[in-house]
Image (spheres, rainbow, N blue to C red):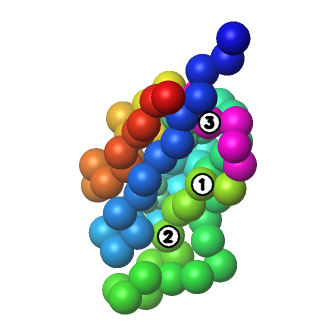
């Protein structure tokens, strides 16, 4: 049975560094085509294959990714 997870990213605090995108083993994060109030293109979850591994949350320098496991 595979683990399911999802992430919530505080997009208004994202600085668009892309670390979470680079490090996600499931490649379910990407930089959006939309930007936040500060003008940064924010990261978002785009796929359903998140396992809840929390790597993205660990590498995010802004500590704005919350991981949920179900
Ligand atoms: S918790 Fe893991 S699988 Fe899910 S988005 Fe973050 S790095 Fe990717
Ligand atoms: S690691 Fe954090 S700050 Fe960088 S793009 Fe991802 S959510 Fe944004």
Give me the residue at 68% from left, 56% from top: 46
| Residue 53 shown left or right of residue 3 in the figure | left
Local SS, label 1? strand
Residue to which mark 3 is pinned = 50
Q: Which residues are magenta?
A: 47-52
Q: Main secondary structure of the magenta part?
A: loop
Give me the residue at 59% from left, 29% from top: 4
Q: Is residue 6 above or below residue 11?
A: above
Q: Is residue 38 above or below residue 57?
A: below
Proximity of marks 2 and 3: CB atoms separated by less than 8 Å:
no
Measured in 3D between alpha carbons, the distance from the residue under mark 2 to the one under mark 3, in whole angstroms, is 18 Å
Closer to us: mark 2 or mark 3?
3
Disc 2 residue lies near ligand 2 with CB under 8 A: yes
Residue to which mark 2 is pinned = 42
In the image, 53 versus 59, the foreground residue is: 53
Local SS, label 3? loop
Disc 3 residue lies near ligand 1 with CB under 8 A: yes
Is 65 in the magenta? no
Measured in 3D between alpha carbons, the distance from the residue under mark 1 to the one under mark 2, in whole angstroms, is 10 Å
Disc 1 residue lies near ligand 1 with CB under 8 A: yes
Give me the residue at 50% from left, 29% from top: 70
Which corner quadrant of the image does residue 23 belong to? Answer: top right
Residue to which mark 1 is pinned = 45
| Residue 27 shown left or right of residue 12 in the figure | right
């Amino acid at each position: 049975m595979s683990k399911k997870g999802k992430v919530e990213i505080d997009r208004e605090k994202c600085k668009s560094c892309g670390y979470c995108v680079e490090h996600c083993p499931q490649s379910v994060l990407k930089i959006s085509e939309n930007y936040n109030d500060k003008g940064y293109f924010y990261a978002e979850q785009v796929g359903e294959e998140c396992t809840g591994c929390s790597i993205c949350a660990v590498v995010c320098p802004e500590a704005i990714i919350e991981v949920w496991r179900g």
